[in-house]
Amino acid sequence: MISDQSLSISVVMPAYNAEHLLPRVLTPLIELLNAGQVQEVLVVDDQSPDGTAALAEKMGATVLTTPVNGGPGAARNLAAEHATGDILWFVDSDVIAWPDGPEHIRRAMSEDNVGAVFGSYDDAPDGQSWFSRYKNLLHRYHHQRARREARTFWAGCGAIRRDVFLEVGGFDVKTYEIPSIEDIELGYRIVETGRRILVEPQLQGKHLKVWTMRNSLSTDIYCRALPWARLMISREGLTDDLNTSTLERLRAGLAGLLILSVLALPYWPGLWPLSLLLLGLAFAANYDLARTMAGHGGPWFAVKCILYHQFYYVYSATVYVWCLFEYHVLGQKQKLQVTRN
């Protein structure tokens, strides 16, 4: 497939207090602008109290400012109104986009009926603690192995035809007042129009976010698992995309049995052979992930990742079960909103 070079690209970067990140994330995009690979670079300053807007303008970006602090979804919606390109290429302000991004975007958009495309993080995240590397590499792992045709979207490094974006109404910033799954929900609406969404593994960027267990738990549960589970249950049930695939659900069930057996050991010590068996099965079921993690940090890194991953499975599955109870038993069928405190 030959890419359509006539398709113009507007880069859209929502930014809040990103002054310290711009020298790294904006420089390669300005280089693409100067090389004629993209038509414009729009940085949307979301009422930052630091010097984000001034530095972005100094570096050569076109700067827009939101009327009030409304989050990245509102910032992207504002950029779409002003963009002149055929394609909106969303790049987060903590992602260093690879310079071959426009080539992969144009090639994907040249295929029949493609409305959007997204990629993944690269294999060299900035945060070097084992947990931060695990989180970023796990995200990459799922995106690199995803089916080519998706029903969701990812705005960290993804692109949408501008006319399609405007047709479906952009990001839903009323339901999702804080950053959560507004990009996933947007993907649902794009697919409902009959357009295709592609996963392009070569469309990559380096993630600069440093994860801790504390911010990961908060994000995973309140900004991802809860709203995503509610969205899936209210729409079409579990999908077979990314980390909600059938195999992932089976692994989550195995992790639940493992955790239950470990919790039972103080009361029934004789269960230890079962716990040991389930642990071995968990490592076997996650062999590909373990091998991937070992390739980036050695065997001990892989062991830590797989052990924590069992906990991740359990709290994610628990959230989904709670949302089923909330929807079918408590009757809270409209509880989708993710609001600011």
Image (cartoon, rainbow, N blue to C red):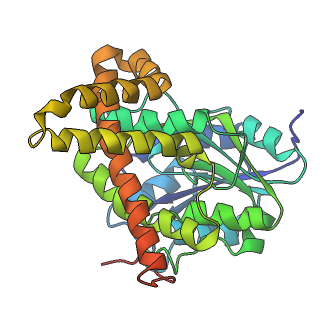
Where residue 322 sits, quadrant-wise, is bottom left
Residue 119 position in % (x across, y down): 62, 41
Q: How many numbered marks appear?
A: 0
Identity of the residue furthest to the left in this view: 266
Q: Is residue 230 above or below residue 43?
A: below
Q: Is residue 25 visible?
A: yes
Which residue is at a point 45% across and 36% down the rendered structure image? 138
Comparing 107 with 337, the one in front is: 337
Describe residue 282's horizontal placement relative to residue 234 as left or right.
left
Q: Is residue 204 above or below residue 183?
A: above
Q: Quadrant of the C terminus?
A: bottom left
Q: Is residue 46 visible?
A: no
Which residue is at a point 27% across and 30% down the rendered structure image? 274
Comparing 154 with 311, the one in front is: 311
Which residue is at a point 60% across and 33% down the rendered structure image? 144
Comparing 333 with 136, the one in front is: 333
Describe residue 47's horizontal placement relative to residue 4 as left or right.
left
Residue 303 position in % (x across, y down): 30, 23
Describe residue 40's horizontal placement relative to residue 284 as left or right.
right
Q: Quadrant of the N terminus?
A: top right
Describe residue 147's horizontal placement relative to residue 176 as left or right.
right
Residue 207 position in % (x across, y down): 45, 39
Where residue 235 sits, quadrant-wise, is bottom right
Residue 305 position in % (x across, y down): 33, 30
Which residue is at a point 51% across and 35% down the rendered structure image? 140
Q: Is residue 151 above or below residue 322?
A: above
